[in-house]
Image (cartoon, rainbow, N blue to C red):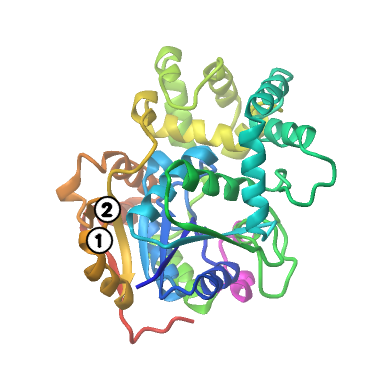
Amino acid sequence: MKAVGVIVEYNPFHNGHKFHLEQAKVISGSEIVICVMSGNFLQRGEPALVSKWNRTEMALLAGADLVFELPYRFATQNADIFANGAVSLLEASGCDSICFGSESGDIEAFINTLDFLEKHDAEFQQQVKEQISLGVSYPKAAALSFKKLSPEQDSDLLDLSKPNNILGLQYVSAIRKQKSGMTPITIARKSAEYHDENFASETIASATSIRKSLFSNHGSPENIRPFMPQSSFELLEKYKQQFGCFHSWENYWPLLKYKLLQTSPEEMRNIHGVEEGLEHRLVSTALESDTFLAFMERVKTKRYTWTRLQRACLHILMNVKKAEMEDAQKSSYLRLLGMTNKGREYLQKEKKNLGLPLVSKTSANQRELELDIRASSIYSLGLQGREQRMLMKMEYSQPPIMIGANKKTS
């Protein structure tokens, strides 16, 4: 059975994601779509709107066949480590190709850009270093350095100021580095840009604009109904009814503030992502801030991007030491979150050929999953009372979600 892989967060699952799944299958000529999905915390260092179980079900009801969890040690890192971990999981799951959305939509531009950067690596790294010394953040430094080095108006190369082009380039680079046999495929993103905060189309909206609408309407999902498959919308409503709220950093601010104020500077310097005296800035700013948003607006600088700061805050909240993240190159297991009947059939046929051990029970694999279990425990602290206990227990008691052939996929 031919399989195509996609690397996703689904925060939450919307019509653009459904289009991506459908196109991935058609363009690659695959029978199976395999998702590698971030768990309860995401690449930008923030909590997912709803749990990984809810998002897994959204994906399976809208066209995915298998969902594996991208471990915390990859899911909450910068683009190259995120991509390396995710690509290694898709390779281990037996995918023939990988399909990602991009602003470019032209896979040749990714290949050409990667070739160009490999050829000019020393000059590129020097340019990046110079930009960073001027106080520019790494993503901006990389985009500026590439623009400076690349020929003017070369349409064969990527625009590296676009977020999905940057991430896609890392996927293609990871495939090459890992000597993977997977074929990279890209499709142009429809209508909404990744960071769009407003609804610019009748049916396609960015996850950013959907989340903004949810929180600005006191958690009422009615405004976002046109932008999500019906099954995803219903699951979003169900989560709110079951657990009482959607997750955002504000849920965790009292916990983070406590952690910042009770951790010594020496201890904080051992936390992954805390560099260059950042610990002093975080602590002094926490003392002055009543909300996470106010804290972030005060602590952010030209050099420290919002994403970099959120990741550092997450690792502080999680107490993740530098040593715990040092060997984050490839995953050592495949954690199954859910499957359809077709996905189960694929696993039965391919189980002996999988490149990594298949994990479906947390209790039997506690040591390997320690960081992911910790992340789920911390994530549940964003809820109160009974709901908190219910979500915490799911990490141990929830079997992989199974969607039968009789369920709707619209």
Residue depicted at x 23% and y 55%: 358
Q: Is residue 145 above or below residue 197?
A: above
Report the residue marked by disc 1.
398
Q: Which class describes the residues within 10 Å of circle 2: few (<14), some (14-19), or many (20+)? A: many
Span of residues in magenta: 214-228
71 left or right, relative to 283: left
Looking at the magenta stretch, what is its main secondary structure? helix
Residue depicted at x 55% and y 15%: 277
- Asked whether the viewer can see residue 389, the reply is no
Residue 224 among magenta residues: yes
Number of callouts: 2
Percent from the top left, x then y, of residue 258? 44, 28
Q: Which class describes the residues within 10 Å of circle 1: few (<14), some (14-19), or many (20+)? A: some
Q: Tell me the quadrant of the picture where the N terminus can be found.
A: bottom left
Percent from the top left, x then y, of residue 135? 71, 21
Residue 408 among magenta residues: no
Outermost residue to the left: 364
Amino acid type shown at disc 1: Gln
